[in-house]
Structure formats: structure tokens, C-alpha cells
Image: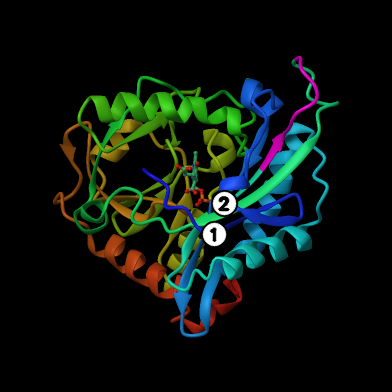
Amino acid sequence: MPITPTKKIWMDGQLVAWDDAMVHVLSHGLHYGTGAFEGVRAYPTSQGPAIFRLREHMQRLLNSCKILMIDVPFTLDELCDAAVDVVRANNMTDGCYIRPLVYLGYGEMGVNPLPAPVNVAIACWPWGAYLGDDGHANGVRMKISSWHRHSPNAMPTAAKGTGLYVNSGLAKVEAIKAGYDEAILLGPDGRISECSGENLFIVRNGVIVTPPPSEAGALAGITQDSIVTLARDVGYEVRFEAMVRTDLYLADEAFLTGTAAEVVPIASVDDRVVGTGKPGPLTTQLQTTYFKIVRGEVPQYMSWLTVC
Ligand code: PPE
């Protein structure tokens, strides 16, 4: 997906012009995948653009860095303030995608990451529907990938580490080359883990089920958590439960969640139509409510928004 440039990017404490936000080709992170990132969205609200669950995203960034033993030279509050500054500096009144990145920079070579300098950047740009407007409205076609998710003792799947995304990329390429929209990866035990950049839910007999992130070797999604919270608040039963591929084939409804993707119905898995093949009633209800919440239209969840 092409990037639409905005004016400013925050780099190590300063706002710099988009075209000046450069790194050296010998940056450690470029060679060894040493870094961590976040994906955050801001949405237009009646009070101006508001960032959705900013603190949770920045805390997860710090957690990823803790796992990877990267010392971030900014506090949680400083990172949150910087994200607000970027949204303001670029006048993103229609909302945007925000990409905080911690990466090991220039000055050291060799696999040992500890001596390398730590750099932090936060950019934002307008980003439409990650899996397409048609996907949002009618559902996406999924394929179970032959690439498995990392085993948690090979790669720390709880960290949103940059290097881990080679695995996601392999699965995504396999899926799109085979004519599907998105990949579902199995965890090391053969159970369902997550998608290349989203968590996954099914609906079975009115109960909402999603794989428990740490057991499934999946990222603990903030959108996943938002959907679990709001579904329970509405009165649905939600379970974190392991599932196998046939649970997807036989589900009444299925959908995926992620910051970039938002809430997207799943139309089919491995060419087995899920339910009626159309977005199901619970999926539609949760998707509609999610879009109201992020736009500040549901007072109960205003604490999830940081107005810029
Ligand atoms: N699993 C993976 C592997 C993942 O990358 C994401 C987010 C999620 C689950 C959902 O997490 P959350 O956003 O907290 O609900 N993927 C980000 C990167 C997408 C990209 O292409 O880059 C995102 O959605 O921003």
C-alpha cells in the first residue's frame, strides 16, 4: 500500500520534515531486524482527531523493547505526548495511522545488539481500509498458511519486533499469490494462532471465541481486547479458547481484528464458506459499535480516546 506523505515525522525528540527523516544504510535494525513498532489509529471526533488507546499501544511498545532488551530513551508519557504532537503537526483532522518505531541505529555492526544506539521515530499518514472497502462490507477470503507462526521459544511472539514480520510477510505472499485476501497462521502446536497482521474471532452458537494470545503464540491485540470488552459489556459470552482449523470452517461467523485492519468479516476459510458467507449479525453489530467508539460516539468508552 503506497504511503501518502505528510509534513513532519518525530525523530528522537524533534519534528523533522518528511523528506529529511533518513537513516544510515548501516543501521543495525536494517541488517538484523532489531527493533519494535506499533500501529495506532487516530479518528475524527466532534472534539477533533483522537488517538485510540494510545497509552496501551505505547506500553506494548515498551514491553516489546523490554523483551528484546532495548533500552528506550523516552518514558511512556513522553512517547504519548510525541504521538499527539505528530498528529497535531500534520493537522490530521480526518484521522490517520500512526507508526511509532524503535530501532537500533548506526554505529555498531555484529549480531550483539547491546552496544547499538537506540533511535525512536513516530510518523503518521492517512491510511484507508487495510483489507479494502469491499472486505469491510462483504468479508475477506482467508487461507490457512503453510507457514506456521513462530514458536515462542524461537521468536518472542509477545513482542511486536520488526524482525518477526518476515514470518507474516511469507504467509501474506503465499495467500495473495494463491488468490486469497489474507493468511491465517497455525501456532507451533497446530492450533489457530492469528493472521499476518490481525487477531481472529469466531462465533459459535452465540458465543464469541478467540485464541488466547500467549498460548497461541499470537500478539495480544489491543483491538482484540477492545472487542472482547465491548462484546462482554453488551452481554455476550466471550471465551479465550484454543481452536483448530475445522472450528473456522464450521463457525457461524468469523471476523478478524487489528488496528490497521479494524474489524473485518471473514467470508470463507480455505474455500469453505463461513456461515452464510455474508457478514453475520454479531460481526456487524461489533463492527458498527467499534466504529462508533473510535469516533467518540459512545460516552462509555471515551477514556479510550486521546483528543489531539
Ligand atoms: N497480530 C499481528 C501479527 C499484528 O501485526 C497485529 C497488528 C495484530 C495481531 C493486532 O493487534 P492490534 O493492532 O493491537 O489490535 N498489526 C499492525 C501492523 C499492520 C501492518 O501491516 O503494518 C497494525 O494493525 O497496525
- Residue 299 vertical position relative to residue 282 in the rendered view, above or below: below
Q: Which residue is mark 2?
A: 18
Residue type at mark 1 is Lys
- Residues tagged 1 and 2 counted as in contact (Cβ below 8 A): yes
Q: Magenta residues, as a range?
A: 102-110
Q: State yes or no: residue 98 in magenta.
A: no
Residue displayed at 69% across by 27% down = 27
Q: Position of residue 48 (x, y in %)?
A: 51, 80
Q: Is there any visible trace of residue 232 in the rendered image?
A: yes
Type of amino acid under label 2: Trp
Which residue occupies 64% across, 58% down? 56
Mark 1, ligand 1, within 8 Å: the answer is: no
Residue 102 appears left or right of 221: right
SS label for mark 1: loop
In three-dimensional space, the C-alpha distance between marks 1 and 2, rounded to whole angstroms, equals 5 Å
Q: Quadrant of the N terminus?
A: top left
Q: Quadrant of residue 173?
A: top left
Residue 211 sits above or below residue 81 on the image: above
7 and 194: which one is in front? Answer: 7
The image shows residue 122 at horizontal and vertical percentages of 63, 52
Callout 2: few (<14), some (14-19), or many (20+) C-alpha neighbours within 10 Å? Answer: some
Residue that protrudes farthest toward the top in the picture:
110
Quarter of the image where the C terminus is located: bottom right
Question: Residue 78: x and y, percent?
Answer: 77, 61
- Secondary structure that dominates the magenta span: loop
Question: Callout 1: 10 Å neighbours few (<14), some, many (20+)?
Answer: some
Residue indicated by mark 1: 7
Q: Position of residue 211 (x, y in %)?
A: 47, 42
The extreme right residue here reads: 115
Q: Residue at x 42, y 52 (%)?
A: 4
| Up-down relation of residue 254 to residue 69 (above or below) | below
